[in-house]
Image (spheres, rainbow, N blue to C red):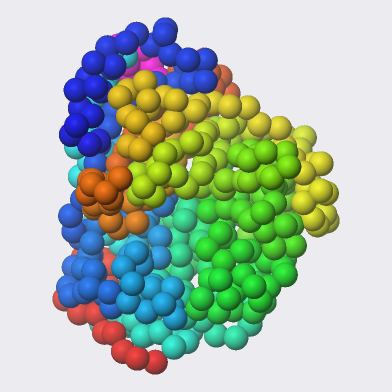
Amino acid sequence: MPAQRLLAVLVSAAIPALFAPAAHAGVSLIGIGQMSGSDLSGLAGTLENGTPANLLGGLGSAIAWAGGDSFLMTPDRGPNASAWNAAVDNTTSWIPRFQSVSLGLTSTVFSAGSVATLTPTLAATTLLSSATALNYGSAPALTGSAGQHYFTGRSDAFAAGLSTNPANARFDPEGIRVAADGKSVYISDEYGPYIYRFDRASGERTGVVALPDKFAATTLSALGDTEIAANTVGRVANKGMEGLAITPDGKTLVGIMQSPLAQDGGTGASTVRIVTVDLASGKVTHEYAYQLDNLGTAAKPKYGSISEIVAINDHQFIVDERDGKGLGDDSKAVQKKLYTIDLAGADDVAALTGEAALAGKAVGKSLLVDLVALLKTKGYTDRDIPAKLEGLAFGPDVLVDGVLQHSLIVVNDNDFLDSVPVQGVATANPNQFFVLGVSTDLLPAFSAQQIPEPATPTLAALGLGGLLLRRRKS
């Protein structure tokens, strides 16, 4: 939180919860924290744009509870805010990874009358790789000293064919969840869209979930705008499978697209698709429709996008729906809302195409919390609220004034920018954690995922072999 807001936060935090607006009744902000610096990848040197290869940034693209006080967080395709090569959308040879983080939730005393300050700590960094060769296209190939083929953030790392070709090296992680055994993680992305399973200890890919071809782009380009213009079907560039949930029993993955598919109207349309995957068979079982809020007018509709989905139980979920405004965009945050949905009895839309057809079958939704309204009660302004509140995960239950509540963690993607302009003034833009306390009676059917916590991976287990990374031009 910006230092100039601290006093306002301390004063407003004393306001009793009973005066909270109905938009977030039963949900309160109980803790905040932030992280910055370098990660534990052991990578040295800089990327093509001069950014350190081990920068600890973009953490809030996704967060997953890993049991106890442990969480896994993945940045997206890496730092591309600095111009260096427009032909590849300024993407770099960033190796996708996940960070193992402890938030300090289980050791913090929470009170409804204040906002606790957490001190998150980084335990490990795990680079993502394939045991088999990958298509790097015109991008530099990234191989490890133990024979790993690392995925890359570079937009030109692909071969001919559908965008869902699992041999392509480009990977843009946006959703992460831990498997029931605690030994594997599932990650969804925007380039494919892909859903991959990785070994939690080594980061090696161990499985692929094949999505229907309707989700794939057929004509690929290193330029997002060119790719959008060239395709009439499939995911819109940079707006693939943004959210990923796993049911508490660990049997089903639930993925949600950031924006409508091209054949469903693209970014100007209202309704996105949700897919469910049976993990025993690895098959997609259902598709459902979710309708976005109209942020414009009836005459000129305008829609935000989806950032995350997290399971309440095996049929109810929380969806993170937002605009792109706020801190990082040098604008005023308007919409950051968490909605609950219930897929029990919802219409399957796998056989339907087009905005009108999907909108007529959209699942109902109910507002759980308006994050903009909630954060403003704690001293934040609409310019302080991060533009990209993207990650969402339940954590361990906590005591708030001795009363058990569910912890719900919201994190931001800071685009690897520690400082951003706000009305011409350089302003801190850290990786931020917002811990919400959710009354148990607000989610009476909540079921927590049971995850055994494995040992923290070592550098040897990650296969870095003396931290030597070979980067060659293919």
User: x, y (%) of residue 399?
Assistant: 32, 18
Measuring 30% from the left and 62% from the top, which residue is drawn there?
A: 126
Q: Is residue 390 above or below residue 12?
A: below
Drawn side of residue 86 relative to residue 101, left or right:
right
Where the N terminus falls, by quadrant? top left
Residue situated in front as seen by the camera: 301 or 10: 301
User: x, y (%) of residue 259?
Assistant: 61, 53
Measuring 73% from the left and 42% from the top, which residue is drawn there?
A: 299
Residue situated in front as seen by the camera: 47 or 346: 47
Where the C terminus falls, by quadrant? bottom left
Residue situated in front as seen by the camera: 463 or 254: 254
Residue 409 visible from this viewpoint: no
Which secondary structure is most common in the magenta stretch?
strand
User: x, y (%) of residue 233?
Assistant: 72, 68
Taking the magenta stretch, the answer to whether it contains residue 421 is no
Drawn side of residue 292 relative to residue 115, left or right:
right
The image quadrant of residue 84 is bottom left
Measuring 75% from the left and 62% from the top, which residue is drawn there?
A: 263
Measuring 58% from the left and 27% from the top, which residue is drawn there?
A: 367
Drawn side of residue 308 relative to residue 379, left or right:
right
User: x, y (%) of residue 424?
Assistant: 27, 49
The segment highlighted magenta reads: 396-405
State the residue lying farthest toward the bottom: 474
Residue 176 visible from this viewpoint: yes
The image quadrant of residue 31 is top left
